[in-house]
Image (cartoon, rainbow, N blue to C red):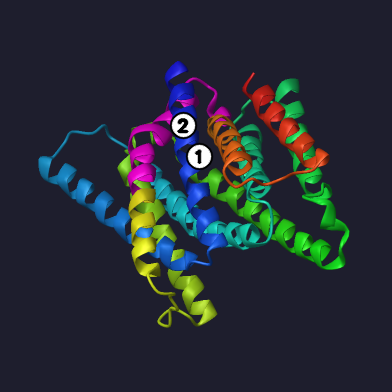
């Protein structure tokens, strides 16, 4: 249990960098789809190289049911596929609204895997856990009701706010469903024996599938538009996201989910990761981005963190 908690918190801290990068890309109008493409191609190359190396070394692994392997592959593909569109929705929201609040709304999608654990995998729906979920839901509502600044009464500002809030809610739903996909293998028969590199590889393949389908639907697949010097920035960001993300995935994240599931606390994985992530990014938005928030939004942040803490109790 202690190992699972520690690894989950460290994963959440590493995820802050994702929010920082998407926030910067959104504010500076960088090409987020191609940022994700570069990140995905680098990630696939690294994961595939490691998988091939493991095969050549013929490392002995426990017997894993075939259906567990296929379900894991499908779930992780779905995780990456939905994650691609979640980033697009979150980027659209961050272009228009307060990044710290938007990050908190998106990460509130943790209620989806939590409910999945209760409804499908016999995780006990205790009073504290139900209370925590309700507090998180209220916090999301308060984020939408609050004001970022005194000019929020202006009609154009209100319309802009409505837009970013809707994009943030869409990203939250996508985040929640992709978290369910990512958490599912930990509940399967012998699922904990499936390596994190295997899971990461299929998640990255799913992200590539999302990029291809999104580009085909928008008709922009082969007609990218870049500002001067943008490709260099995108490549550097993609490398940094992989350096942080792959390290967390291989060593921390999936091991945390497996350890907590083994301790009959699988539904606590994402809440622990997300709570540390939300706190870190909220501090970044306040101290570095200098974003100002209203009373209701500060209250929503406090209630959201309280809800996550109560869930973990």
Residue drawn where x is 60% and y is 39% of the image: 287
Q: Residue at x 54, y 50 (%)?
A: 178
> Camera-side residue: 280 or 73?
280
Q: Report which residue position mark 2 lands on.
A: 257
Dot 1, crowdedness within 10 Å: few (<14), some or many (≥20)? Answer: many
Q: Is residue 215 magenta?
A: no
Quadrant occupied by the C terminus: top right
Q: Hey, which residue is sitting farthest left in the picture?
A: 57
Nearest the viewer among 163 and 114 is 163
Quick one: SS at disc 2? helix
Disc 2 from disc 1: Cα separation: 7 Å
**Can the viewer see residue 17?**
yes
**Magenta residues?**
242-268
Asked whether residue 124 appears in the rendered view, the answer is: no
Residue 243 in magenta?
yes
Q: Residue at x 36, y 68 (%)?
A: 231
The image shows residue 8 at horizontal and vertical percentages of: 48, 29
Give how far across and how far down residue 210 sits, in percent: 47, 65
Numbered badge on residue 90: none
Around disc 2, counting alpha carbons within 10 Å, would you say few (fewer than 14), some (14 to 19), or many (20 or more)? many
So how many labels did they put on this image?
A: 2
153 to the left or right of 2: right
User: Would residue 97 appear left or right of 69 to someone viewing this image?
Assistant: right
Question: Judging from the image, what secondary structure is the residue with disc 1 in?
Answer: helix
Residue 299 on image: x %, y %: 79, 34
Image x and y of residue 181, in percent: 51, 47
Q: Earlier in the sequence, mark 2 or mark 1?
A: 1
What secondary structure is the magenta-colored segment mainly? helix
Residue that mark 1 sits on = 183
- Name the image quarter holding residue 207: bottom left
């Amino acid at each position: 249990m202690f190992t699972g908690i520690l690894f989950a918190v460290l994963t959440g801290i590493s995820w802050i960098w994702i929010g920082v990068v998407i926030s910067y890309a959104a504010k500076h109008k960088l090409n987020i789809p191609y940022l994700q493409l570069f990140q995905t191609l680098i990630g696939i190359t690294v994961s595939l190289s490691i998988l091939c190396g493991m095969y050549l070394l013929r490392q002995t692994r426990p017997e894993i049911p075939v259906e567990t392997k296929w379900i894991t592959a499908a779930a992780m593909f779905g995780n990456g596929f939905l994650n691609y569109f979640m980033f697009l929705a979150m980027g659209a929201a961050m272009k228009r609204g307060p990044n710290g609040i938007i990050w908190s709304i998106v990460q509130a999608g943790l209620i989806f895997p939590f409910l999945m654990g209760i409804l499908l995998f016999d995780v006990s729906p205790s009073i504290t856990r139900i209370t925590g979920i309700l507090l998180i839901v209220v916090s999301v509502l308060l984020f939408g009701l609050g004001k970022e600044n005194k000019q929020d009464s202006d009609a154009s500002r209100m319309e802009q706010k409505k837009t970013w809030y809707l994009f943030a809610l869409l990203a939250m739903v996508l985040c929640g469903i992709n978290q369910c996909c990512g958490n599912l293998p930990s509940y399967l028969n012998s699922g904990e024996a499936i390596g994190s590199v295997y899971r990461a590889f299929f998640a990255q393949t799913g992200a590539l599938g999302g990029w291809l389908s999104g580009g085909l639907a928008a008709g922009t697949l082969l007609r990218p538009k870049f500002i001067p010097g943008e490709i260099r920035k995108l490549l550097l960001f993609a490398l940094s996201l992989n350096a942080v993300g792959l390290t967390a995935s291989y060593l921390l994240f999936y091991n945390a989910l497996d350890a907590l599931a083994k301790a009959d606390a699988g539904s606590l994985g994402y809440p622990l990761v997300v709570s540390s992530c939300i706190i870190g990014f909220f501090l970044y938005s306040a101290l570095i981005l200098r974003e100002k928030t209203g009373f209701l939004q500060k209250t929503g942040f406090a209630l959201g963190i309280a809800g996550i803490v109560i869930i973990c109790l």
